[in-house]
Amino acid sequence: MSYTNNNKKNKIALIDCNSFYVSCERLFKPKINNKPVVVLSNNDGCVISRSTEAKIIGIKMGEPYFKVKELVKKNNVKIFSSNYALYGDISRRVMKTLRSFSDKIEIYSIDEAFIDLSHIEEKEVESYGKEIRERVLKWTGIPTSVGISNTKTLSKVANNIAKKKRAGVIYIKDNIDEYLKNFHVSDIWGVGKQLSKLYIKNGIDTAYKLKNISNTWVKKSTNVLGAKTVMELRGISCINLETQETKRKSCCVSRSFGKKIESLEKLQESITTHCLNAAEKVRNDNQITKSVTVFIRTSPFDKYRKYYSNSITIDLPVATSNSIELVKTAIDGLKKIYRYGFFYQKAGIILSRLKDSSDNDLNLLAPIMENKSQILMKAMDFTNAKYGRNAISIAQAGVNNSWKMRREHSSKIDTASFDSLPKISV
DNA sequence: TCTGGGGTCCTAGGACCC
DNA sequence: TCTGGGGTCCTAGGACCC
């Protein structure tokens, strides 16, 4: 079998925001523009975004905060707790700007999007990439890097190189192999820890070597995704641009606790809170769920205490998005998996097998029941949207929750609230 | 003392059926 | 006492992503 490369003309750009969360915080504090800055995960647990200066100091991605505290102090690194409401808002503005270039866009994550540039003249491609960067910076204040090539995987490679070289835009076309020879196999999109191990064990340590591996070997040693990656490195497009926005298939809300908890009562409070939030998200998308999973666990890092982790999934007789029903189901589940005598570190809920509320099962009772509860849920969502999340809750969620997460470095910026917008003096 | 959260897809293997 | 073969569907868990 021979492959004909009919994608030669495909051009895909990957636009990726530089140190996105850090860049968002900088929008409101220009003073920290050339200073080392990091943003921490929920609970101030790990480092999840670093400015270039922070990277140079040696702060690694994903590292627990307490391990880098010394480094932070010594180098006067500015620390922020994460503020997802803010990042989500800025992200929407970035994506809107990108849409002004093309409708053929796939929003891949909060800070990344693929755009189809196949219609752009060969000689114009690079300057077009520069224009994208400039417009996003001008309209939103967020710096980006742009990688362009024939396939999504190759544009990921190009983007990675653009970031490393701080080149702004990298367009990989004829000189692909030269780039791939210097590209480590573990940096390829779709090659994680396990695949890296396998490839390196077999002497494949660069993207160039992976590109030239035999089809039979990849198919035998990995799975279809592994094979697709190899094809994409060869410039043959296998992973399509998903321009259609699809609704989520599952919805998970979970948190680590600010401090470990032991009692069923406190676990019930947290599960109730998470369940209410998940149900609200699902209703927001006009979806209903058929399945509720509850999970709890102790800390996997605690060397001195026994580890316990468990989950339970309960199928509902009729799909629903009714908070009260879902909370009841979740609490029933929690009681089944709770064990006394453990110090719990995290709890969460997953609503799965989601579907559109319009295509509910043919259940004769459901329409009437749903109608009543829909009115109640709508009133609840409306009030919470107006007066803040959890303005209306249910008693089980508790008040003054001692298990709430830590956020000691919050910038407290909310772009929806006018007062916190930056003041400009002319 | 302190180690995030939210997704998707794939596969092996069990259950079940004829 | 002997005890096939092939198909589908479902699920838990793993791997990967940001």
Image (cartoon, coloured by chain):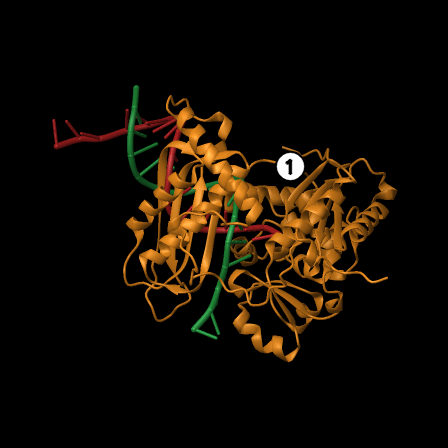
Chain colours: A orange, B green, C red
- Residue A221 horizontal/vertical position (percent): 51, 47
The vertical placement of A376 against A84, above or below, is above
**Vertical arrangement, residue A50 with respect to residue A293, above or below:** below
Q: Is residue A250 visible?
A: no
Q: Position of residue A87 (x, y in %)?
A: 64, 53
Image-based side of A164 in relation to A201, left or right: right
Q: Can residue A397 be seen in this view?
A: yes
Closer-to-camera residue (A135/A418): A418
**Callout 1: helix, strand or loop?**
loop
Q: Residue at x 68, y 58 (%)?
A: A420
Location of residue A290 in the rendering, given as x and y in whole percent from the top left corner: 41, 35
Residue type for callout 1: Glu
Q: Characterize the local packing of mark 1: few (<14), some (14-19) or many (20 or more) Cα atoms within 10 angstroms.
A: few
The residue lying furthest to the bottom in this view is: A74
The one nearer the camera, A247 or A279, is A279
Of the pair A64 and A237, the residue shown nearer to us: A64
Quarter of the image that includes the C terminus of chain A: bottom right
- Residue at 72% in and 49% down: A15
**Side (left or right) of A363 relative to C4:** right
The picture quadrant where one finds residue A259 is bottom left
- Provide the chain ID for the residue under circle 1: A
Tell me how many marks there are: 1
Residue A351 x/y as whole percent:
44, 42
Identify the image quadrant of the N terminus of chain A.
top right
Near-viewer residue (A100 or A302):
A100
Residue A37 relative to residue B18: left or right: right
Label 1: which residue?
A242
Viewed as shown, does residue A68 lie left or right of A266?
right
